[in-house]
Amino acid sequence: LVLLGLPGQHSSMLCLFEVFLVPGPGASEPLLSEEIMDHTQAQIMTPEEADAVGFKGIPEDPQGRKRVFVAVSPRDSRLVHSRLEANASVGAFRMHEIET
């Protein structure tokens, strides 16, 4: 995965969680609380939004599951990881480390 940046920018890391949602009406729980969103400055994006902001190389899910992406700084990745694990709307997820 690649995040396209501007020339001359210093590189840093970003954690991108690829979150597969549980199908059906049971998937109504918000991924992250407002408090966590404010604390971590996490960004939740659809695949189209992720592509539009410059995330390239995200392959389609071969199983066709509904998914969203959560971008967060590495320092907050453990907190977001634990919240996603405990969320009933999340069927599965994986984390990608991205150099920006």
Image (cartoon, rainbow, N blue to C red):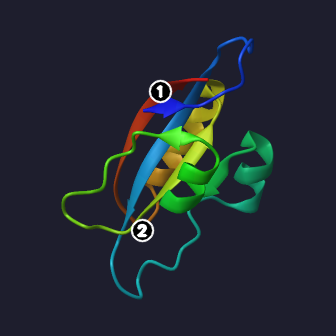
Residue drawn 54% across the image and 74% down it: 29
Please identify the residue farthest to the right as the structure is shown. Answer: 38
Residue drawn 67% across the image and 50% down it: 43
* Percent coordinates x, y for residue 15 in the rendering: 54, 32
Please identify the residue farthest to the left as the structure is shown. Answer: 63
Quarter of the C terminus within the rendering: top right
* Residue 46: quarter of image: bottom right
Residue named by callout 2: 88
Establish if 74 lies above or below 40: above
* Percent coordinates x, y for residue 17 in the rendering: 47, 44
> What numbered label is drawn on residue 41?
none
Quarter of the N terminus within the rendering: top left
In terms of sequence position, does the residue under pointer 1 or pointer 2 come before the other? 2
* Residue 76: quarter of image: top right
Q: What residue type is labelled 2?
A: Ala
SS state under label 1: strand
> What numbered label is drawn on residue 97?
1
Establish if 31 lies above or below 40: below
Residue drawn 42% across the image and 49% down it: 18
Residue nearest the observer in this picture, 20 or 75:
20
Q: Which amino acid does label 1 sit on?
A: Glu
Q: How far apart are marks 1 and 2 (CA)?
A: 24 Å
